[in-house]
Image (spheres, rainbow, N blue to C red):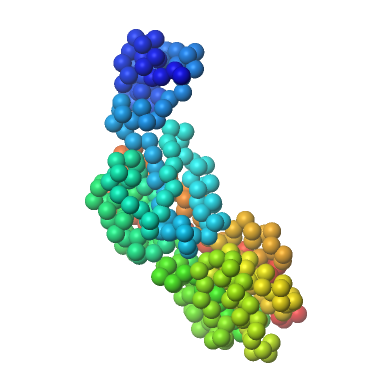
């Protein structure tokens, strides 16, 4: 196997010079860079990031930290974030996906390894980790959760507004009695989505069916179980529409309706949140709030790379990206 030492020996340069040839931002003569890269290609050398980091004292691992990968992080949300990051990740960086809830040995796993961290935050419980990153002077961008007055760069969406838009649409479609399968308690997204629901009920004169206000945890299983309980209410008193805190929950709710022989949307309308890949493929296709996950992840990793490169803004700031309602087939027009 060809090593960086073989390239350095063949080119008659130091290990550091070879490493600089592979760093577009490094100061090195163009002719020297071209000669080294040509020799490396001829020898079949593939740069090893670990070796390169030893030579340049630079880290080449970016961390993506979710709040908790074992609960409260829908698979579709996880995959969308990771795929979006990979779309803009430079070839000379590796990605390390972790969660905050199960992190051990911050120094060894984060401080000594990572050039920067993208925090995909769901809960204020993450604040201690975010503060620790700041204390260690590790470039950090926090996405998904609104930090209020941020000390770190923050990219988020207005989940309350997204649900409020969905409630306005339900009211316009003639729905009066509504219910909700909530998100994971303690998560900011769950609190904001419940706030949007409550604000919509108040502003559009809707009736909240108490027995149809069900707990959830952002899972298909919770959606199925909680919708099953809602469907056991008398048909005359149960809601005509149920808002689910995310699309995984909504998919479970659709399954419960199918198993109970309740047609969607004729007998029960269902709304989701996120606009995951399943939303357009479900039967019927799911009306949902499109959370700008791709935009948040893309903006977050782009900003993180800029911070690592030393392109710091004078003031830490927050970007809020608006969600949008995607209307498909799962809401009935009760005026017809």
Give whichever of 243, 27 is nearer the camera.
243
Residue at image point 41% right, 54% down: 99
Residue 32 appears in the rendering: no
Out of 68 and 62, give the one closest to the viewer: 68
| Vertical relation: 191 (above or below) 10 | below
Number of marks? 0
Residue that appears at 27% across and 53% down: 132
Left or right for 115, reference 260: left
Q: Which residue lies furthest to the left in this view?
A: 135
Q: Where is residue 315 in the image (x, y as percent from the top left)?
A: 29, 52
Q: Which residue is drawn at 59% across and 66% down?
A: 220
At 30% from the left edge and 26% from the top edge, which residue is drawn?
55
Residue 46 shown left or right of residue 278 in the figure: left
Q: Position of residue 300 (x, y in %)?
A: 42, 49
- Residue 277 vs 216, above or below: the answer is above
Q: Quadrant of residue 240?
A: bottom right
**Residue 330 x/y as whole percent:** 68, 70
């Amino acid at each position: 196997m060809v090593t960086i030492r073989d390239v350095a020996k063949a080119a008659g340069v130091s290990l550091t010079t070879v490493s600089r040839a592979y760093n577009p931002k490094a100061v090195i003569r163009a002719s020297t860079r071209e000669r080294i890269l040509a020799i490396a290609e001829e020898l079949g050398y593939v740069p090893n990031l670990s070796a390169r980091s030893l030579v340049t004292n630079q880290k080449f691992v970016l961390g993506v930290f979710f709040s908790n990968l074992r609960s409260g992080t829908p698979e579709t949300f996880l995959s969308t974030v990771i795929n979006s990051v990979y779309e803009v990740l430079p070839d000379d960086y590796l990605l390390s996906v972790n969660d905050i809830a199960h992190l051990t040995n911050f120094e060894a796993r984060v401080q000594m390894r990572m050039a920067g961290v993208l925090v995909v935050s769901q809960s204020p419980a993450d604040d201690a980790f975010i503060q620790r990153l700041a204390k260690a002077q590790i470039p950090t961008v926090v996405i998904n959760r609104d930090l209020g007055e941020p000390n770190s760069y923050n990219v988020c969406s207005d989940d309350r507004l997204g649900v409020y838009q969905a409630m306005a649409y339900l009211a316009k479609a003639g729905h009066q009695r509504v219910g909700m399968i909530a998100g994971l308690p303690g998560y900011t997204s769950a609190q904001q989505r419940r706030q949007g629901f409550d604000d919509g009920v108040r502003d559009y004169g809707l009736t909240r069916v108490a027995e149809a206000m069900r707990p959830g945890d952002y899972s298909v299983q919770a959606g199925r179980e909680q919708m099953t309980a809602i469907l056991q209410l008398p048909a005359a008193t149960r809601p005509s529409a149920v808002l689910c805190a995310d699309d995984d929950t909504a998919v479970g709710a659709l399954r419960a309706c199918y198993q109970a022989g309740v047609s969607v949307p004729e007998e029960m309308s269902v709304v989701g949140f996120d606009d995951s890949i399943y939303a357009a493929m479900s039967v019927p296709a799911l009306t949902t709030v499109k959370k700008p996950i791709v935009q948040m992840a893309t903006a977050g990793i782009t900003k993180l790379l800029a911070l690592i490169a030393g392109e710091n803004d004078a003031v830490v700031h927050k970007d809020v990206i608006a969600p949008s309602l995607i209307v498909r087939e799962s809401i009935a027009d009760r005026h017809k």
